Amino acid sequence: MVSTELGAVAVFTAVVLFVWSPLLVVERLRALFVWPTRWMALNYALLGVGILLVQCLSYLAVFLLAAGIGMVTGGDVAAIVGGVIIVNLAVPSAGAIAALRTLPARGIWSPAGDGLSGRIALGVGVLWYAIVTTVLFLVIGAVILVANLPT
């Protein structure tokens, strides 16, 4: 049973990273991924998986707060979906704020540059991430629900 859950998390992670990757055409966002290694693709994968790991652990916290360790009832679903939407905005927002606070001070990244401002690009990235993760969460939840219906 654990492999099913890990498979769902792996699919969730892969799809979110794939769907968010077109935003890397924005130079200020692409410049965020110059650390910790020299390879942008590896940095993108490492940082993305780290953020999504925090995201999935936050989902677990939402489930436990909304439904405890018992069965999820119809009343719990609204609390879970609301909590997930909050987490989907809070986790990338916290990451963006941390990037804006620490990276310029260390000389790793600057929000200023040619083209679109890094702050605006980061805000668009956070909103797009929240939309993608919310929709994908709902789709995976629906698939799991349908797969577990009695026959």
Image: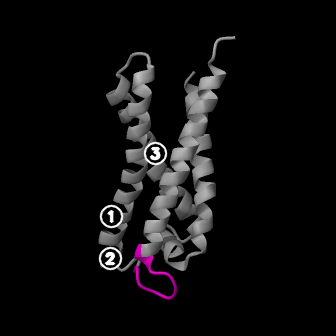
Which residue does the numbered mark 1 point to in the structure image?
98
Residue under label 3, please give it: 53
Q: Position of residue 3 (x, y in %)?
A: 59, 28
**Residue at the extreme right of the image, as rendered:** 151
- In three-dimensional space, the C-alpha distance between marks 1 and 2, rounded to whole angstroms, equals 12 Å
In three-dimensional space, the C-alpha distance between marks 3 and 1, rounded to whole angstroms, equals 17 Å
Left or right: where 7 falls relative to 70:
right
Q: Earlier in the sequence, mark 3 or mark 1?
A: 3
In the image shown, does 37 or 138 lie closer to the viewer?
138
How crowded is the residue under tag 2: few (<14 C-alpha within 10 Å), some, or many (20+)? few
Indicate the quadrant containing the C terminus: top left, top right, bottom left or bottom right.
Answer: top right
Q: Is 38 drawn above or below residue 47 in the view shown? A: below
Of label 3 and label 2, which has the lower sequence position? 3
Extreme residue in the top direction: 151
Q: Are marks 3 and 2 in contact (CB under 8 Å)?
A: no
Going from N to C along the chain, the mark reached first, 1 or 2, is 1
Query: Looking at the image, which residue is at 57% across and 69% down?
Result: 40
Q: Is residue 51 above or below residue 10?
A: below
| Residue bounds of the magenta highlight | 110-119
Q: Is 94 colored magenta in this rendering?
A: no
How packed mark 1 is, by other alpha carbons closer than 10 Å (few <14, some 14-19, many 20 or more), is few
Type of amino acid at the residue the image marks with label 3: Leu
Residue 109 x/y as whole percent: 41, 77
Contact? badges 1 and 2 (CB < 8 Å): no
Residue at image position (58%, 68%) is 23
- On the image, the x and y values in percent for residue 32 come to 47, 71
**SS under mark 1:** helix
Is 62 rendered above or below residue 121? above
CA separation in Å, label 3 and label 2: 25 Å
Residue 106 tag number: 2
Q: Amino acid at mark 1?
A: Ala
